[in-house]
Image (tube, rainbow, N blue to C red):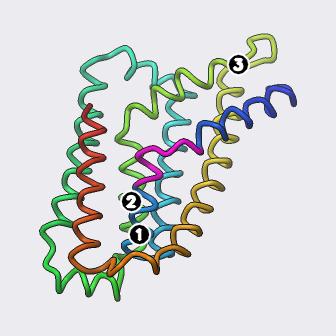
Amino acid sequence: MPSTTTLLVFAVAAIALIVIPGPNLVFIVTRTVSQGRRAGFASALGVDAGTLVHIAAATAGLSAVIAHSPTAFAVVKYLGAAYLLYLGARTLLRRASNAAATELTPEPLARAFRQGMLVNVLNPKVALFFLAFLPQFIDPERGSAALQTLILGLEFFALGLAMDLLYVTVAAALRSRVSGPGGPRGRYFTSAVYLGLAAFAAS
C-alpha cells in the first residue's frame, strides 16, 4: 500500500501531466463542440474506461510486453491511427444535411462511449506512459508492486475523470461561440482534428 505522502506527491505529478493537452483531451473537446454536452460526457467516460484497461494491463504486466515487442507496439499503434482516420473520413464524407441532422439528434451515447474507449485503448503511448510513470512511485518495501500499481492507477483514473468532465463542461459552455458546429465548417473542423490525431498516433 503506498504511503500517504506517496499518494499526495503522485496526485500532484498526475495533475500536472493531465492538464497538458493531448489526443484524448482534443477528442473529448471536439466531440463536445460538435455534438453537445451529453456526447462529450459519454466520450469522456469512454476515454477514462480505456484508462482502466491500461491500468489493468500495467498491473498485469501486459504493458511491458507491448513496450518490449516492436511488432505488438506497431500493431496497436497503427490500429489506433486507422481508427482515428476512419472517424475523420466518416465525418468529412458525411453529407451536410446528415451533419445537420446529427446536430439535432446526436449519435447514440453508447457509440460515443465506445469510440472514446477505443481511441484510448488503441493508443500504445498511454500503455508506455503507465509503464514509465507508475513504477517511479512503487516502493518494494511496502508490499505487492501489483497492488501499489493498481492503487496508483485508480488514483490517476479518478483525477483524469474529474478533469475530463470539467473540460466537457467548459467546452459545452463555450460551444455557442462555434459557428454552426453541425454545418460544413464544423464538420471540416471535426474531421481535421480526427485526421490530425491519426497522424499524431502514427508518428
Which residue is pictured at 66% across the width and 56% down the height?
A: 162
Q: Earlier in the sequence, mark 3 or mark 1?
A: 1
> Which three-letter amino acid code belongs to the residue tagged 1?
Ala
Q: Distance between the Cα atoms at labels 3 and 1?
A: 36 Å
For the record, the magenta segment spans: 19-26
Tag 1 residue = 110
Q: Locate the N terminus and report the quarter of the image it occupies.
A: top right
Q: Label 3: few (<14), some or many (≥20) within 10 Å?
A: many
Tag 3 residue = 138
> Which three-letter amino acid code belongs to the residue tagged 3?
Ile
Tag 2 residue = 114
Q: Distance between the Cα atoms at labels 1 and 2?
A: 6 Å
Q: Is residue 125 left or right of residue 81?
A: right
Residue 23 belongs to the span the image colors magenta:
yes
Q: Locate the C terminus and report the quarter of the image it occupies.
A: top left
Which residue is pictured at 24% across the width and 57% down the height?
A: 192
Residue in front for this viewpoint, 154 or 5? 5
Q: Label 1: few (<14), some or many (≥20) within 10 Å?
A: few
Please tell me whether mark 1 sits on a helix, a strand or a loop.
Answer: helix
Residue 188 horizontal/vertical position (percent): 22, 66
